[in-house]
Amino acid sequence: MSRIGVFICHCGENIGRTVDCARVAQSLGDLPGVVHSVDYKYMCSDPGQVLIKQAIQEKNLDGIVVGACSPHMHEKTFRKAAASAGLNPFLCEMANLREHCSWIHEDRELATEKAIALGRFIVEKIKYNRPLSTIYIPVERRALVIGGGIAGIQAALDIADGGRDVILVEKESSIGGHMSQLSETFPTLDCSQCILTPRMVEVAQHPRIKLLAYSEVESVDGYIGNFQVKIRRKARSVDETKCNGCGECQKNCPNKKIPSEFDQGLGTRTAIYVPFPQAVPNIPVIDRASCALFRGRAKGVKKVVCGKCAEVCGRNAVDFDQQDSFVTEKVGAIVVATGYQLYSIGKSQELDILRGYGEYGYGTIPDVIDGLQFERLASASGPTGGKILRPSDGKEPKKIVFLQCIGSRDPAKGIEYCSKICCMYVAKHTMLYHHKVHDGKAVVFYMDIRAGGKGYDEFVRRAIEESHALYLRGRVSRLSRDGDVIRVQGFDTLSGEPVVINADMVVLATAMRPQPGIAALAQKLSVSYDQHGFLNEAHPKLRPVETNTAGVFLAGACQSPRDIPDSVAMASATASKVLGLFSKELLEREPLIARVDRMTCTGCFHCERVCPYGAVERKTLTDSKGRIIKVIAEVNQGVCQGCGTCQATCPSKSVELDGFTDEQIYAAVNAI
Amino acid sequence: MSAEHSSITSPKEHTSARPQQSLSSQIQNATGLDPACCYQCGKCSAGCPMANEMDLKTHQIIRLLQLDLDERLLASEAIWMCLTCETCTTRCPNQFDPAAVIDALREAALKKVPGRVPKRISAFHSAFLDQIRMHGRVFEFGLVASYKLRGGPLFADVESVPSMLSRGKLTFTPKKIEGIKALRRIFEQCATEKSK
């Protein structure tokens, strides 16, 4: 006969307001097998836990039912309390009387009846609970970081400095990400490359960081502590081990007019190229789509069309026949730091929910550019050497209009969120413009100024007061070309006056979106994402860098729009989570997993086919002489997530899910 | 606006908190559009071809509606100036429909005080509809004459006559459409509906 204790929590007024807790306790106390039943205002409080511990010891209880909040909240608390009183923690269970009852009902009588039924459900279930013990699985103490922008760099450095090996995967030929494209950074106006490149060099020199540039994650298998990651090393057409980065190939490439991605199409590059002088690694890559040799090959031309780069390479490093190769790495944790892309305001859009801005004529009106293009114009390493010049005719613009919230906060165009960084970088742009073109006039159309952050609002005020940027509150209706100038048709809602400005250049502060291909990566990692493709954190407040897949963490703008300080802070937070995970050799996990009965398993492997986690393995049973008796299913304790699909599928009823056995479920269901 | 602001007795925070008889809920019932979704960016007013002629700009109309300042709104000339070109509706970032709201406001204004339409605007609408009834299309010369006889400003826009003539936009003989009888039946039907 069981000796069960029932503890009903009022949760202050949360449960007590709608449920008669005393009656629930009394009613459950009458059930056979229940020898102790009480109610208390706050079960999770210290005195509440003492009530439980005392009852276990005084009444020699062999099962505890706590009727309180969701087990997500306090199951750990009560199981620890039970364990400290000498009871196996898995003989303690919770009945959810708050989220499942008091919060969603109004009628006190009916809610109390339901609470009693929920309590009875767990009381009957717990009579069949078995003591279970925690499972320990080994941890591979190396991390994979996906994305070599500032977030990925920071996460990799912090983990490596913490004494663990890191593999950093970057899809471009150099790390640095968008931060390497920026001119100056807010709110201090320090040069972006000056603060970034030391970090990039540190990555390259760190003995614990293995940098795989020009590579992408192909597939991910395994589970927390034990991931196997297959990485595609894209063919650079240059042997990384031979190349010394002298740059001769780049100088001699005849194809010099390819729009440079790094300069956002405002400058040009060669077909064999290093995206920018401080690239890490400083090894060129051949863009096969624009290289004459590869284009000739693609057309089936037998003659070798070019080959200048290979001719001038003193180290014989150029390899036109290089193929993509694959490496597999075993890691214990994965950090996703894939960053962002800018919303394209043109007509063609990547997602169906997005609509372009026909009214702003991007791509048809010259000198309507986006924020990153302005960064390249203002950057000393940019195509104009840091001079602000119009892309169309190279003239110095005397009036620039900046439009904020392009794509952002615009549900009609598909994005309702605020991109967070635009107010700040537009203010920065007006300052840079003022510093470089003293007689230039910057006009900003904004809806609200969102400058929350240390020194941020002061920065915007400086743009207005010291750089004399004119801020107009309103959205622009239309941009049109009027001879040499761009006619900006707007409205200043503060004065109530229509405004028409003839601008020499217009800069659109376009929204931040996640990188293309984020959905495919998220699916490889089993991480969920929102309708815009931003990856979901495990809890928006309390677990902001973890995901719902154990062992996968987030850093930077892949989770939501973020500026540099936020991305760096998040990357360091992630690193501390990873180092925490790696602090132990063995990982503890709950033993609520599937178990196969060796005696009755017939080896049909239905379970193997339905398991979503690939946790079922085949095991050969032999007798003492080594002869095979039969092949049966076995569950890998590390991989199993306890979903119970195998249990439901097994035709011979040989699979049981610990904590949710058939016996327990039938007993519970029969009780209501 | 300061004088009008004194008449705001209670700030309206949520749709559900609005009294049912308030103008904003009336308009919401008529159009299915919640004025609360406007965040006053002014893109509607920026693109409005009539903005310079209007005493209240489009976004201000929506703002006054959010504040339920009925008298100011319904007495304004602006709601009658709207051409229903729907540029505001097309460009609104919140998929709001100011053109439909203005139309609903006109109905509300007429319901409250029939014949409240400013005289010149009413004269123009009547002259326009007369043309449609007679010819099935607009006969510009007749429209101008009829409008001015009904009290439109006599010598306004006279300077544009020569250029309109030279472009063939102003003819002296009306042309009827083919289905004029069917069209007149529509007018008759509407008249009987109205008298009911």
Image: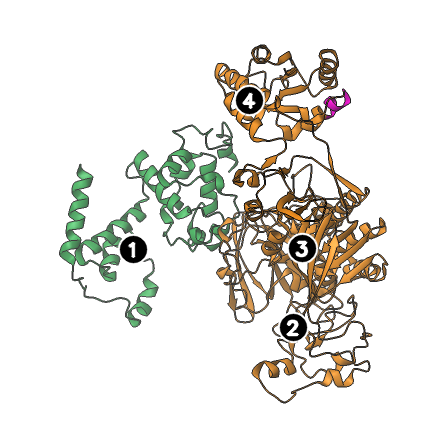
Dots 4, 1 in contact, CB < 8 A? no
User: Which element carries disc 4, helix, strand or loop?
Assistant: helix
Mark 1 to mark 3: distance in Å?
66 Å
**Mark 2 or mark 4: whose residue is earlier in sequence:** 4
Q: Which residue is mark 4?
A: A121
Query: Callout 2, which amino acid?
Result: Lys
The verdict on residue A84 being magenta is yes
> Nearest the camera: A284 or B109?
A284
Q: Residue at x 57, y 16 (%)?
A: A17
The verdict on residue B82 being magenta is no
Dots 1, 3 in contact, CB < 8 A? no
Residue neighbourhood size for the residue with mark 2, other residues' Cα within 10 Å, grouped as few (<14), some (14–19), many (≥20): few
Q: Quadrant of residue A635?
A: top right
Q: Is residue B4 visible?
A: yes
Residue neighbourhood size for the residue with mark 1, other residues' Cα within 10 Å, grouped as few (<14), some (14–19), many (≥20): few
Q: Which residue is mark 2?
A: A395
Q: Is residue A524 above or below residue A97?
A: below
Residue neighbourhood size for the residue with mark 4, other residues' Cα within 10 Å, grouped as few (<14), some (14–19), many (≥20): many
Residue A347 at x, y = what percent? 50, 63
Q: Chain of mark 4?
A: A
Q: Chain of mark 1?
A: B
* Mark whose residue sits in front, 4 or 3: 4
Query: Which SS does the magenta portion mostly show?
Result: helix
Residue B10 at x, y = what percent? 50, 27
Q: Which residue is mark 1?
A: B154
Mark 1 to mark 2: distance in Å?
51 Å
